[in-house]
Image (cartoon, rainbow, N blue to C red):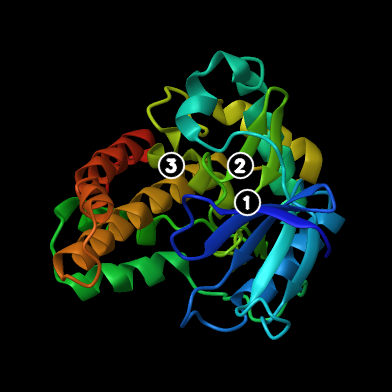
């Protein structure tokens, strides 16, 4: 590239460095790994973005990617810059997005249908773990009892939905990882947690209360279950089991609660002293309350 100009680091993205710049008059984004990062992650993400674009998912166009041996100094992806808003509070409250909000739940359903159509062999090395048992293991590691989480594990293990579908799953599809314009969703970001699994996991994660950011509606704070499901079913041709959706929402609430415990422990241990991590740790009780709502919706553990 010639004529590189305006290189500046962007806020956010704790796990990877993100910079914006322009080259030959084109607005671009550079993401690169920090020192010590696990090798192969950004290469896999670049493959995923290319496969997603081919499947009709709105994602940034990958302009270049590499292992860092070409002078960048670390594995990297260069993507085109997509204009729009990612801050959930603004998306949910600003007048600029008033027309977008009623459209977004159905758009998300349609986009998730496209994501779940991406071939599972689009890139190598995608994990295929059981997310419930993965987070149950993390929870057990901390030896920090939370009776609501114990009840939730019992409830989730007893009610696990049966499914034969295994697709590529985004893993963190939510308000905050979407670029939004006045007409709705423009792009899907942050593919780091992509894996193979039950596609309804993505729908449930989007509906978790943590990603409503104070909005009153269950889908990202901006939409209804009916609109999300209608968009997904129309685009995929697959009927969504509402009980399975509630199960995955509960699993998302539990998973986020365990992540909150882990974040707080990282701060308390001194490994990373961070007001943000400490504040996230204080949200464990919120996820317990959310899980009690899931029990009310589908019956308490017996």
151, above or below 245, in the image: below
**Sequence-earlier tag: 3 or 2:** 2
- Is 100 in front, or is 291? 100
In the image: residue 126, left or right of residue 264 = right
Tag 2 residue: 178
In the image: residue 210, left or right of residue 139 = right
Picture coordinates of residue 301, whole percent (x, y): 27, 49
Tag 3 residue: 208
Which secondary structure, mark 2? strand
**Residue beneath the point at 83% across and 65% down:** 1
**Sequence-earlier tag: 1 or 3:** 1
173, above or below 170, in the image: above
Q: Is residue 118 visible?
A: no
Which secondary structure, mark 1? loop
Label 1: few (<14), some (14–19) or many (≥20) C-alpha neighbours in 10 Å: some
Tag 1 residue: 189
The reply to whether the C-beta atoms of the residues labelled 3 and 2 are less than 8 Å apart is no
In the image: residue 3, left or right of residue 32 = right
In the image: residue 139, left or right of residue 240 = left
Picture coordinates of residue 20, whole percent (x, y): 64, 52
**Residue beneath the point at 27% across and 50% down:** 276
The reply to whether the C-beta atoms of the residues labelled 1 and 2 are less than 8 Å apart is yes
**Sequence-earlier tag: 1 or 2:** 2
Label 2: few (<14), some (14–19) or many (≥20) C-alpha neighbours in 10 Å: many
Label 3: few (<14), some (14–19) or many (≥20) C-alpha neighbours in 10 Å: many
């Amino acid at each position: 590239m010639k004529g590189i100009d305006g290189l500046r680091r962007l806020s956010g993205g704790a796990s990877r460095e993100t910079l914006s710049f322009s080259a030959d008059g084109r607005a671009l984004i550079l993401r690169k790994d920090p020192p010590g990062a696990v090798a192969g992650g950004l290469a896999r993400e670049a493959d995923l973005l290319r496969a997603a674009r081919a499947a009709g998912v709105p994602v940034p166009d990958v302009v270049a990617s590499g292992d860092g041996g070409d002078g960048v100094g670390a594995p990297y992806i260069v993507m085109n810059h997509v204009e729009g808003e990612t801050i959930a509070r603004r998306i949910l409250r600003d007048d600029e997005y008033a027309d977008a909000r009623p459209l977004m739940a159905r758009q998300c359903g349609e986009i998730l249908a496209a994501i779940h159509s991406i071939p599972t062999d689009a890139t190598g090395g995608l994990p295929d773990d059981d997310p419930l048992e993965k987070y149950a293991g993390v929870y057990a590691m901390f030896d920090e009892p939370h009776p609501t989480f114990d009840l939730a594990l019992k409830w989730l293990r007893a009610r696990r939905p049966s499914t034969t579908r295994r697709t590529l799953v985004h893993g963190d599809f939510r308000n905050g990882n979407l670029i939004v314009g006045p007409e709705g969703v423009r792009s899907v970001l942050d593919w780091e947690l992509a894996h193979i699994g039950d596609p309804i996991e993505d729908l449930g994660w989007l509906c978790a209360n943590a990603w409503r950011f104070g909005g009153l509606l269950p889908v990202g704070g901006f939409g209804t279950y009916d609109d999300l499901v209608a968009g997904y079913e129309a685009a995929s041709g697959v009927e969504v089991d509402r009980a399975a959706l509630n199960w995955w929402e509960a699993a998302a609430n539990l998973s986020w609660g365990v992540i909150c415990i882990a974040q707080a422990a990282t701060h308390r241990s001194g490994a990373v002293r961070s007001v943000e991590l400490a504040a996230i740790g204080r949200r464990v009780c919120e996820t317990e309350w959310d899980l009690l709502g899931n029990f009310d919706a589908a019956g308490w553990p017996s």
